[in-house]
Image (spheres, rainbow, N blue to C red):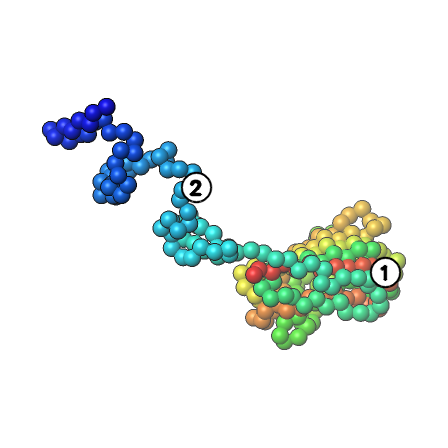
Amino acid sequence: MAITINGTANTVAGLAVGGLPDGSTDADALASNAVTNVKVADDAIGVAELSATGTASSTTFLRGDNAWAAAGNVKATIATEAGALSGATNYDFTLPANCFRVDFVGQEISTSGSGSPAFRLGTSAGILSSSNYDWTQDFASHEYESDENEIHAFDPNLNASGDTGDLYVTFLQASAADKWVYRGVGNRRTQTENMYFIGFPDLGGNALTTIRFYPNGTGFDTGRFSWTAYSTV
């Protein structure tokens, strides 16, 4: 087919595919938005062709604002303290760096005499034991406890020799290293009602570093425990 050039209409007809020499057409010769998606071969555009800011790597991802950014993630430190409960022992858990949550699980817990399972929290000032804890509890009766020396929210039910129960308590960071809340649920195996509570500590402006579980009385007769901590990296 002959090539026809129409100078009036500025058109060229009869040009076969591939008829122009390679390199004879540059970006200036293409109309804006002339190359559509269907004209781009699959896998033809690589990372190097993107106009994104930042640096592409195995540790970054491309955000919606066309910027390469590091991906945040969460790691879990699981059961760094776990085992059997026995005697008048303090079971202290040290929080890992950047920790925002700690879960405590206690199973088949019983204490001697008038003992009751309890928690205390620690900071750089040591274990706090003087009017540092407030909470609301919901058992057979509803109570608000304030300025307590320990978190002993289960003592209305787990408070005598032979009482056996199970506990699940979570400590959650709110907005800063010294702002935490705690919540828990427990049972006494011989009673139909469960025990619930939620409260907050006064850490004196210091970061939480330690959580202590201990028998607020003579000692533990039976039980097992585990700690699970969550921290950002």
Is residue 154 visible in the rendered structure shown here?
no
Mark identifier at residue 43: 2
**Does residue 229 sit above or below 64 in this rendering?**
below
Q: Nearer the viewer, residue 230 or 89?
A: 230
Give the x, y percent position of residue 228. 69, 58
The residue pinned by badge 1 equals 222
Spatial CA span between label 1 and label 2: 64 Å
- Say which label, 1 or 2, has the lower sequence index: 2
Q: Secondary structure at mark 2?
A: loop
How many circles with numbers are drawn on the protein? 2
**Residue 165: quadrant of the picture:** bottom right
**Residue 55: quadrant of the picture:** bottom left
**Does residue 193 sit above or below 216 in this rendering?**
above
Q: Is residue 61 left or right of residue 170?
A: left
Q: Secondary structure at mark 1?
A: strand
Quadrant of the snapshot with the N terminus: top left
Q: Nearer the viewer, residue 168 or 188?
A: 168
Give the x, y percent position of residue 151. 71, 63
Q: Nearer the viewer, residue 117 or 191?
A: 117
Give the x, y percent position of residue 104. 71, 58
* Residue at (19, 29) in percent of width and height: 12
* Residue at (43, 38) in percent of width and height: 42
Mark identifier at residue 116: none
Residue type for callout 2: Asp
Q: Furthest-bottom residue in view?
A: 125
* Residue at (25, 36) in percent of width and height: 20
Instruction: Please identify, in this view, whether the residue under mark 1 or under mark 2 is nearer the observer.
Output: 2
Give the x, y percent position of residue 8. 11, 28
